[in-house]
Structures are given as C-alpha cells and as structure tokens.
Amino acid sequence: MKLVKLNALCDFEKGSTGLAKAEPGEYPLVTTGAERKTSNTYQFDTKAVCIPLVSSTGHGHASLKNVHYQEGKFALGSILVALTSKDESKLDIQFLHLYLSQLKDRVLVPLMSGAANVALSVKKIQGIEIPLPSIGRQLEIVEKFKSIVIEECELKAELTHQQFLLKKLRQQILHEAIEGKLTVEWRAQNPCVEPASELLERIGAEHAERDKGRRTNAQKQLPPMDGEEKPFELPSGWAWCRLGDLISISSGDGLISSQMNGGDIPVFGGNGINGYHDAYNTNEATVTIGRVGAYCGAVHLTPEYSWVTDNCFRVYFSKKNIDTEYILLHLKQMDLGRSSYKGAQPVISGKRVYPLLTQLPPFREQQAIVAKVEKLLKLCDQLETLLSRNQVYAKQLMQKVLKEAFSYHGEYEPSKCDSYGSEYAHD
C-alpha cells in the first residue's frame, strides 16, 4: 500500500471563529471539546476533518482528546484547522478522520511542540504520510466501521437496560427473601422449627445483659406495635418486631488519614475499607452501618480484626439467635439511609432506626434464606457476565476492522479515549 503526504490529498484552512466571541445560532461550531457549540454564521459547507492545534491538557503536556469529523455548513474555532479532500475520487474524508482519530496518539501528538503552550503546526500536519488504499476500499472500511459502531451503541443501550433490570431483580430477590417468599418450599419440608417468638425472648435477655456498661445508645423507647402498621401477613413461625429489638448500635472511633499508615488492619468508613492501620478496635466480624454523609445507611461486614471509624455504627446483635449473613442482607434491604436526618448532610441515629418495623424468621430459616439469596445472586452475576461479553465482542470486531484497515501500523492499538461513536453512530 502506497504512502501519500496529506498536503497532496487535502486542502488546509484554519478556523476563523473566536470561541469567546461567537454568537449562538443555527450552525454547528466545532471546538476542541467533544460537544459542538453553535454559531450564527458558517465558514464551511463541506466534509472536513477538524484538528485542534493546541494541547488538550496544556501545561507543557502534549495531548489531543478529540479529532472531529464535520459535514454540511459549520463554523470552526480559530484554534483548529479543517482538512478537506482535494479529490474525493482519491480520498474519502471520513476514511481520513477514521485514520487520524484512531492513531492520533501515534501520528499527531508526537508532532506537537512547545514548552508551556504545546501546539501543533499546520505545516507538520501537511507532512504526515498515510497509507492510501483504493477509494473503494476506503469506503468499504468506513461503512464496516459505521456498522460496528451502530452495533456497539445498540449493545451498550441494551446492556444498560439489562443491567437496570438486573439491579431491580437483585432488589426484588432481597425483598422477597425477608418476606419469606423464597423459602416457601423449605418451610413445607421443615415444619418443626423453633419459632422466632422464642428467639426474641432470648435476644431481649441477651441484649439487656450485653448493654450493661457498654458505650451504646441502647436506651430505646420503642413504640408498641398495632395491627394496622403491619404491611403483610407473616409466614408461620415468623414474628414482627422493632429493629431495636434485634440490634444495638454504637459509633466507632475517630482516625485521621495520616494514621492509616500502611498496617494490615482494614479501616472501615461508611463506604467500606478506607485504608489500613496497625491497630484494631474490633476483634470479631462486625456489621457496620454508614452513620453520616454520602454513604449514610450503607451496610458492610468487617473481617475478624478491623478498625471501625466514627463515620460508622457498629451493630451488636445476638449471634446465637440471628445469623450474621442474614442480618447483613436484611439491613441492606431496609435501606436505612431513607431514615436519616436531612440537614447539611444526611445523618442516621438509633432514635431513627430503632423504631423501624421489621420481621424475624426462625434461626434455621434465616440460614436457608441466606443460601437461597446467594444462589440467586450468583445467577444474576452470571447473567451480567454474559451481557458484558456481547459488548466486548463488538469492541473486538471494531479493533479487527481497524487493524486490517491500517495494517501499515503493525502494532496498531485503538485509542481508549476516542469519540468515534458520537461522530459516526447516527450518520
């Protein structure tokens, strides 16, 4: 395949529209950014590749985030240059855009120069040599690329939709789990289990003993329950209660960033592990609840040794009567962040969460629920993996087409930040 310099194939014209002074209007205004602005006048009425002449990041660093394709009537910013085909029977301008946008980091960026203000000269662009297949082959490459872009966009949209449905499915699984709908068959096969009412009696006695002398907000003024408050009929053996009947909470201990000095003890904040420390304040697996801020109400499970910060509550519960994994998924499903105080930032407290109405299944059924949920969520993970493979396949097809088209560059790799989808998907 022959190599031809761009100055033999293209006409070059710099933009004439000052971006700061442009009057909005009906014509697209191509700038260095990914999105078009508008102008009340136009400079071109043609197909063009538009290349920024300044670095996208500045500060002495050479980079180009966008190489644009534009057609019809449009205005061009003064810090860009438009390349138009001298002879469309020899060079398809969309083929040129495809080439320059995909290989910009290897073809254009190395030509940029300057100390503080890194720039790209038109003269250097004119001297670029590109492989030039026949016009028929150029058009074939562009059309194949467009079809793959469209396919990838459709797959992305479908993947987004399916991921939304999977998220809803995960929520529904947790919702049905704590209503006993997932363990109907289990109850039929296990009719003789200790009822939750007996668990509650033992939990109450254990909490009273545990909370003696403990630094916890365990003074719970729990309102009595009435029939109208209960939203649905519980399965046999289950019991209604207040969340404060099941758990007690107390905040963790403060720890500043400089104290996370690279030890091997994980430090838990509202969003999970925030760093590592060389000491622990919790020596058993503990459920935590985000107490304040963006992760208010977020629920996590710590390993045996951890440091729980004051952005979290430790959750105390009777491990003899409540399965740890069950209370973890139960609290997640309750979405405790909805019960926060809405001030400058959300905050939850025992006063807000303890009175929440909830339900408790028998201990063995708690374990059966956890096993069922884990199985169903694993299937959700497998479905999500299958959906993602379709998108990967489309990207592999795109890379194959581009590699074949630009085989002159034997080590061709598509840029990770190209914006080809928005340029071509709707042509």
Image: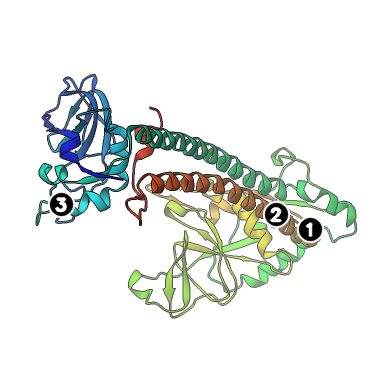
Residue 229 is situated, as x and y percent measured from the top left of the image, at 69, 40
Q: Which residue is mark 1?
A: 365
- Measured Cα–Cα span from mark 2 to mark 3: 56 Å
Q: Which residue is mark 3?
A: 112
Q: Position of residue 128 (x, y in %)?
A: 19, 46
Q: Are marks 2 and 3 in contact (CB under 8 Å)?
A: no
- Cα–Cα span, label 3 and label 1: 67 Å
Mark 1 packing: few (<14 Cα in 10 Å), some, or many (20+)?
many
Tell me residue 106's x, y (percent).
26, 53
Where is 391 relative to 16, above or below? below
Residue 83 against residue 309 in the figure, above or below? above
Relative to 157, does residue 236 appear above or below in the rendering?
below
Q: Amino acid at mark 3?
A: Met
Q: Quadrant of residue 79?
A: top left
Along the line of sight, which residue is nearer the eye, 130 or 352? Answer: 130
Left or right of 77, for residue 174: right
Amino acid, disc 1: Glu
Q: Quadrant of the N terminus?
A: top left
The kind of residue tagged 2 is: Val
Q: Which residue is mark 2?
A: 373
Camera-side residue of 73 and 159? 73
Q: Earlier in the sequence, mark 2 or mark 1?
A: 1
**Closer to us: mark 2 or mark 1?**
2
Q: Along the polypeptide, which appears first: circle 3 or circle 1?
A: 3
Which residue is depicted at the point 40% across and 28% down?
Answer: 426
- Foreground: disc 3 or disc 1: 3
Residue at point 44%, 65% (across, down): 310
Q: CA distance from mark 2 to mark 1?
A: 12 Å
Label 3 crowding class (10 Å Cα cut-off): few <14, some 14-19, many 20+? many
